[in-house]
Amino acid sequence: MTVAPITDDLSKHHGPTPTLLPLEPGEQYRFVFDASVCVGCHSCEVACAEQNQLPPEVRWRRVGEVEGGSFPNTRRFNISMACNHCLEPACLIGCPTEAYVKLSNGIVDHHAEDCIGCGYCTWNCPYSVPVFWPERNVVTKCDLCKPRLEQGLTSACVDACPTHAIGIEKVDIAAWRADHSQGDGLGLPPASLSLSTTRIVMPPNVPGDLAGASHEQVELEDPHWPLVALTLLTQLAVGTTLATALAQTAGGIASGNAALVAFLAGAMALVASLGHLGRPSHAWKALRNLRRSWLSREVALFGAYTGAAALHAVVSLAVPGLAPWAGFGAGLVGVFGIYASGRLYLVPARPAWDTPLTLVQFFVTATALGPLVAMGVLPDRELGQGIGVVLLTVALGSLVLALLALAANALRLASQPTRESWGSLSLLRHHCRWERRARVGAGVIPVMLLACALTTSGDATRALAGAAFVFAGVGESVGRYRFYVTVVPRSVPGRFASNGRA
């Protein structure tokens, strides 16, 4: 097999064998794809899999289809995409372990030995390029066939393409940063999201309504049960800590029961989060990227909160006078933790999450569940001076706000005419219709119970608050499950008879 070296122009692949073109200062290598000559034979996919010894479920290069026009004037094109080796790679920016590095030749390289398999890069990439390799328990991706480039050869996919639809060329970084319009088109996410460097050669007479053949194919995502547990338990714990500190301030008596419950919830959340990692024994590496990654900040802040919550429990038993201060201090750290936790979901690659309403939902869970836990654990003497009424009122208002946030998010998705927003709304309404009813029902019932609790006293109030906690807990759990499974990620177009990921 003859291997074509790297060139600066795709058209040169049709002429004599070119020579390797070295990079000048301010340049990098990139892919170029000519949709006018791609026949969709998938040779590039096969060559990539063979070169990198990939299992069937792991694909670094994918071939999809786009179509448009009106009968009888319809057009269909194929599109082959791998990593775009972006100028501002979202995978690199968000990775908590700094497993990604941007090399001097432009390649966005991934160091598997530093990867903990959290999959956060798979959420961040608007092209869904990084893919989890189950047998290795790490994320992997295209590296432009770096070993071949170092030998002066071109990538395996380029070499295997029978029509020369794929090539590698040099690009002036500053010029591309100023004008990257040639990275758009063919149903792809906007190149501006991460400054994708892949140049797309568009066919002539492309219809204006071009869309992926998989446009209407959406499916439920992974529920990420460890993350459901992590987010719910941390939010419950922080809310409980703050409610306990408030009661200790007003009551003047500090039992350690509620503070201990908050600490245990926080500790259980951290343990549960390990189940989300492909390599949990390397979890400590998640603290490496505090300056850029919200996931690193979440880990650091919730770790600090759990320690502070333990101190609050000890102080509540040993030095009651200092308990409120310890509680509010731990709660403040937890509030920052919830904020970091919410921010890591605000990624353009997942529009259903990319809204301030995500932060609202996370904080509302804390202020709805935490006061109810405190109501059930704190002794009567610490619920005096109207603290019980305050806690019930906060929980009631939070549950009402949670229902309003759900409605607002549904209206937001309905107002955005994109595949991702339409797909998420469709999953919410149809695939998760029973969960939707359960979420609304389990949100309305505790509101009514708490309204009744505010008109009673004594054991009746505690009983109503306990019942409200059970329903609210079920509602928040169902809601968090829906949060994960109904998100539709941005990606490259898929095939007609496939899911939305080519």
Image: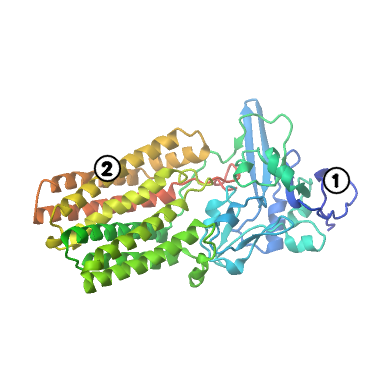
Q: Residue at x 41, y 53 (%)?
A: 339
In the rendered structure, which amino acid carries the disc numbered 2?
A: Val
Q: For this view, does 244 lie left or right of residue 489?
A: left
Tell me if I can see residue 267 in this picture: no
For label 2, the residue is: 400
Q: Residues within 10 Å of mark 1 (few under 14, many from 20)?
A: some
Q: Which quarter of the rendered picture does the N terminus lie within?
A: bottom right
Of marks 2 and 1, the one in the foreground: 2
**211, 376: nearer the viewer:** 376
Where residue 465 appears, as percent x and y from the top left, is 18, 53
Tell me if I can see residue 424 in this picture: yes
Give residue 243's mark: none
For label 1, the residue is: 12
Write down the quadrant of residue 242 in the picture.
bottom left
**493, 93: nearer the viewer:** 93
CA distance separating discs 2 and 1: 64 Å
Where residue 303 appears, as percent x and y from the top left, is 41, 66
Where residue 319 appears, as percent x and y from the top left, is 23, 72
Q: For this view, does 262 lie left or right of residue 378?
A: right
**301, 14: nearer the viewer:** 301
Badge 2 marks a residue whose secondary structure is helix
Q: Residue at x 34, y 67 (%)?
A: 308
Q: Residues within 10 Å of mark 2 (few under 14, many from 20)?
A: some
In the rendered structure, which amino acid carries the disc numbered 1?
A: Lys
Which residue is farthest right? 16
Q: For this view, does 138 lie left or right of residue 13?
A: left
Write down the quadrant of residue 49 in the picture.
bottom right
Q: For this view, does 338 lie left or right of residue 207?
A: left
Q: Residue at x 14, y 45 (%)?
A: 452
